[in-house]
């Protein structure tokens, strides 16, 4: 496995699911290939949508057909990770996807 979910992320997901009274699907989307982190890469080095898309799969142990999914992404940079994940989840049959992020990185132009 290329990426493991930290205990902090697992706990946030568990608590969100509990509060929203929904099933915790942590592990439904699996990163099978490591990609550079968008949040720490220069704009020209950030992984593309396709790189993210090719790096993740839906765990076949999860049936997402007809489900409403809350996708938790810790940091939103330009959206390629979230869009690729949502695409994979929709392809697995999900009816609706909501994306929640803890934070958003500054645009490179804001740093200079």
Image (cartoon, rainbow, N blue to C red):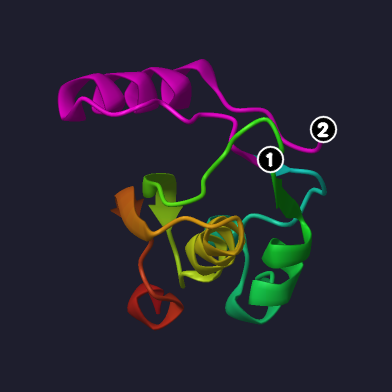
8 vs 6, left or right, is: left
Element type at marker 2?
Answer: loop
Element type at marker 1?
Answer: strand
In the image shown, does 87 or 81 lie closer to the viewer? 87
Q: Residue at x 80, y 38 (%)?
A: 2
**Going by the picture, which residue comes out furthest to the front?**
66
Residue 1 image label:
2
Identify the residue position indicated by label 1 in the image: 30
Q: Mark 2 or mark 1: which comes first in sequence?
A: 2
43 vs 16, left or right, is: right
Between the C-alphas of marks 2 and 1, the distance is 8 Å
Callout 2–callout 1 Cβ contact below 8 Å: yes
Q: Residue at x 29, y 26 (%)?
A: 17
Q: Position of residue 69 (x, y in %)?
A: 38, 47
Position above or below: 89 against 107: above
Q: Residue at x 60, y 55 (%)?
A: 92
Q: Is residue 34 visible?
A: yes
In the image, the segment drawn in magenta is 1-29
Q: Position of residue 112 (x, y in %)?
A: 40, 79
Image quarter in which the N terminus is found: top right
Q: Position of residue 59 (x, y in %)?
A: 69, 38
């Amino acid at each position: 496995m290329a990426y493991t979910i930290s205990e902090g992320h697992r706990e946030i997901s568990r608590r969100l699911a509990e509060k929203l009274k929904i099933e915790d699907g942590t592990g439904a989307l699996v990163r099978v290939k490591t990609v550079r982190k968008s949040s720490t890469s220069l704009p020209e080095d950030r992984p593309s949508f396709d790189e993210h898309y090719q790096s993740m799969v839906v765990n076949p142990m999860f049936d997402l057909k007809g489900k409403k999914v809350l996708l938790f992404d810790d940091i939103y940079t330009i959206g390629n990770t979230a869009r690729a994940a949502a695409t994979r989840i929709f392809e697995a049959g999900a009816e609706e996807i909501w994306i929640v992020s803890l934070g958003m990185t500054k645009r490179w132009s804001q740093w200079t």
